[in-house]
Image: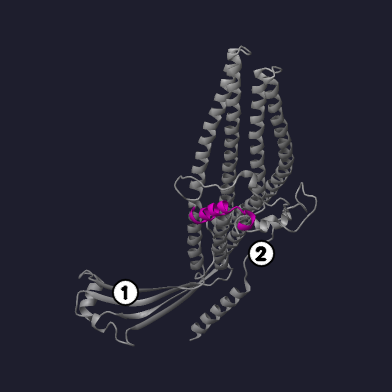
Amino acid sequence: MKRIKNFLLTLILALGAVSCVSKLAYTEPDLQLPEKFQYTATADTASVANLEWKQFFSDPILQGLIEKGIKNNYDLQIALKQVASSQEKLKQAKYLQYPDVGFAVSAQISKPSENSMNGKSLNSFLGQNHVEDYNAAFNLSWEADIWGKIKNQQEVSRMQYLQTYEATKAIQTQVVAAIAQGYYNLLMLDKQLNIAKSNLELSTNTLSITEKMWQSGDTTSLGVQQATAQKQSTELLITQLEQNIAIQENALSILVGENPTKISRTIEMSDTSLPQDISAGLPAAMVSRRPDVRQQELVLLESNSMVGIAQANMYPALKITASGGVNSFKIDNWFQIPASLFGSVLGGITQPIFQKRQLKTDLNVAKIQREKNVLAFRQSVLNAVGEVSDALVSNESLKVQEQKATEQVSTLKNGIKSAEMLYKGGMANYLEVITAQGNSLQAELNLASVKRQRLSSIVDLYRALGGGWK
């Protein structure tokens, strides 16, 4: 009776210790964030990344593509399966504090040597040459979480689950941005194709005029050849653009999880609209919003819990085992109650003393891993701030480039008209006309490219700030 009281006292003290232990404290690293992003005039708390992607992208065709991508993209589906897998592990981790309970039924028949002490004893006392043993019992094993090891294990499972969740959000931001970039690239190619076809008409007209002038002796055959080459160059460009359009349609189809097919478009690139007055918000808010940065912080939190586990492994462990059931050496009275009942309880404290330095090594490695993850977290924040700054400067620069490119196109179109009039009046040669047409074509193609780059920079800024997963 006294032993039982001592055992219960030890158990109560252990349980009291459990309530006093918490997980290892976490100190957030100093990220040394700037007060505002570079290339922003003021530190505005609002951010365009707070907009849901349906609010940010107003084009119905693009919205439909993004919806398909979020639903069908295989990278996203794989990430969601990983979330489901981690969720199951998280559910299991909640039961780590409970004891292990098992049930076992066994039957054993042993026949010792008749010349052995056991054999002679059996014959003398039982009148038989073998012994039977039948056992049915519940077995229980439980370790008291005195040093918070189980709590830290549960925290590791929770951090791993949240990492998969943030990883899914990060993939969605990438998928949304990639679909938008592909769609705007497709609109740019459409615009460039229309420009090339319009230029083909100009080249055809120039060739017709040149041929008539050659027939009348006002120019040489070289002029006809040059005009023909100009027309052929434009036809080649049209073929290349049609090829690029088909490839871009295929890439978009795969992004949204479909077989390669045609992508319907109802608007031109000039009709697209994205928020123009973009507010980047504060760097500190971006850190908490960007899924990839948040994921890296969760990795750091996981490594902090791993240090706690490594520390707990160096301290004494209180383990309690118990078993109880029915036991008999004859099968016919196996389940006679209460005669066949038995039970046992064992409690013990084990303290690791010499483990070939394994426990200390594990602790030091866990601490080093935590330090590595601190650096990785800081690097992810630095990269994120750099991406936002790049997108901001690109957007501002591309505004100016678009304006200059528009002025250049207007100037060169007027130059084509002047060159054609002078050519017809004999005041300019065929080379000047062809040069004017070629320059205008390149300028218009460049303007379409600059407009697409401007749209892309806005999408990049939206993604860099952490938008697209809402």
> Which residue sits at x=19%, y=80%?
127
Does any portion of residue 30 appear in the rendered image? no
Q: Secondary structure at mark 1?
A: strand
The answer to which of 424 and 203 lies nearer the viewer is: 424
Residue span colored magenta: 54-72
**Residue 304 x, y percent position in the rendering:** 62, 59
- The amino acid type found where label 1 is placed reads Val
Q: Which image quarter: residue 21?
A: bottom right
Q: Is residue 422 above or below residue 9?
A: above
Q: Nearer the viewer, residue 47 or 101?
A: 47
Say left or right for 441 vs 98. Answer: right
Coloring applied to the structure:
one colour
Residue bearing the label numbered 1: 105
Give left or right: position of 44 versus 127.
right
Q: Judge whether residue 297 is colored magenta.
A: no
Residue placed furthest toward the bottom = 338
> Would residue 39 appear left or right of 332 to someone viewing this image?
right
Which disc, if any, is residue 25? 2
Percent of width and height locating residue 38: 76, 47
Question: Compared with residue 184, is residue 166 higher up or lower down, i.e. above or below?
Answer: below
